[in-house]
Amino acid sequence: MSTRRWFAAIIVLAVFARVGFLLLFGHTLSLQTSGYDTYAVNMLDGRGYTRFDDRSGDSDLPPLYPFFLVGVYKMLGRDPLAVAAVQIVLDMGVIALLFWLGRRISGQDAVGLLAAAFYGFYPYLLYQNLTVNDTGIFIFLLTVGIAAAYRARDTRAWIWAAWLGLSFGLAALTKTWVLLLWPLLTWWWARKLGWRQATRLALVSGALIALTTAPWAVRNTRLQGEFVFLSTNGGSNLHQGNNPCSADYLTRGWDVQ
């Protein structure tokens, strides 16, 4: 088959795999196991960005995914299947971008197709990206940013650096560690394009990252009375992994957060 037909087949089969999961195991998806749902419900009810009944605001989790849920709930209703359906669309975007990246990096269509297929049929993500958590939207924004970095390297156009900054800034509002990639990409641009061009692209992308993340950092700092960048959950995974209560929560199907 032609490359276009192989790619179309990967997209179709990836959608079928996700729809099949929903038909077989959709009943296992739950809003109550996600801390993000509580934020979204409280915002819809006018109680602000919080997951606590006795507070009008908190900074425990980064904000993008709860706001994403608010949009889904307003358009499609508060239903885990509605969330899964929208996240399937994001997954298809990732598959398309990985196909482009694989072909761009290797110069071979087959590598692009393999990259798309590995992501599209990776068993863990068939479950993870359909549940009410931020993994799917983060991977989408991360992939958009990496693709924009390659386009900026190829075209030397500031608009692609701006797309990188916007996507990484939004991704940071989901998982802050994505910002560690920005200086590495700047160094890569410098290796390929020279420091003068890399500095121009880095300034543009860095400005967009700052503009995207600064409002939430200001909000958090005013709320907490001290500097808080995007969230206060730093170290929580280490704590959860060493907390004797974690195993009991996990066996009962709850998110330890």
Image (spheres, rainbow, N blue to C red):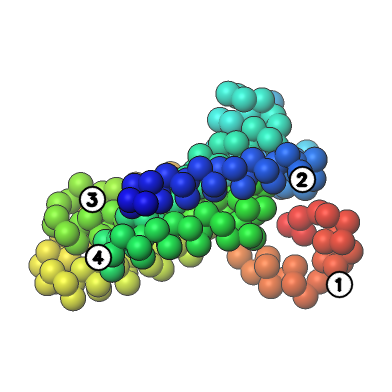
Circle 3 or circle 2, nearest the eye: 2
**Whole-Å distance between the Cαs marked 3 and 2?**
40 Å
Instruction: Where is residue 37? Give x, y as percent.
Output: 69, 40
- The residue under the point 69% across, 29% down is 78
Mark 3 and mark 2 lie on one chain; the one further toward the N terminus is 2
Seen from the viewer's position, the closer of residues 239 and 250 is: 250
Q: Which circle marks residue 24 in the picture?
A: none
- Count neighbours of disc 4 (C-alpha within 10 A) and say few if under 14, some if 14 to 19, many if 20 or more: few
- Count neighbours of disc 2 (C-alpha within 10 A) and say few if under 14, some if 14 to 19, many if 20 or more: few
Q: Amino acid at mark 4?
A: Gly
Q: To which residue does mark 3 refer?
A: 160
Circle 2 or circle 4, nearest the eye: 4
Seen from the viewer's position, the closer of residues 218 and 193 is: 193
Residue 43 occupies quadrant: top right
Kindly check if marks 3 and 4 are in contact, taking CB atoms under 8 A apart as contact: no
Local SS, label 4? loop
Q: To which residue does mark 1 refer?
A: 244
Q: To which residue does mark 4 refer?
A: 107
Instruction: Where is residue 32? Give x, y as percent.
Output: 79, 42
Kindly check if marks 3 and 2 are in contact, taking CB atoms under 8 A apart as contact: no
Q: Amino acid at mark 3?
A: Trp
Q: Amino acid at mark 2?
A: Phe
- Count neighbours of disc 3 (C-alpha within 10 A) and say few if under 14, some if 14 to 19, many if 20 or more: many
Mark 3 and mark 4 lie on one chain; the one further toward the N terminus is 4
Residue 28 falls left or right of residue 154: right
**Whole-Å distance between the Cαs marked 1 and 4?**
50 Å
Seen from the viewer's position, the closer of residues 171 and 142 is: 142
- The residue under the point 28% across, 64% down is 108
**Whole-Å distance between the Cαs marked 3 and 1?**
47 Å
Q: To which residue does mark 2 refer?
A: 25
Local SS, label 1? loop
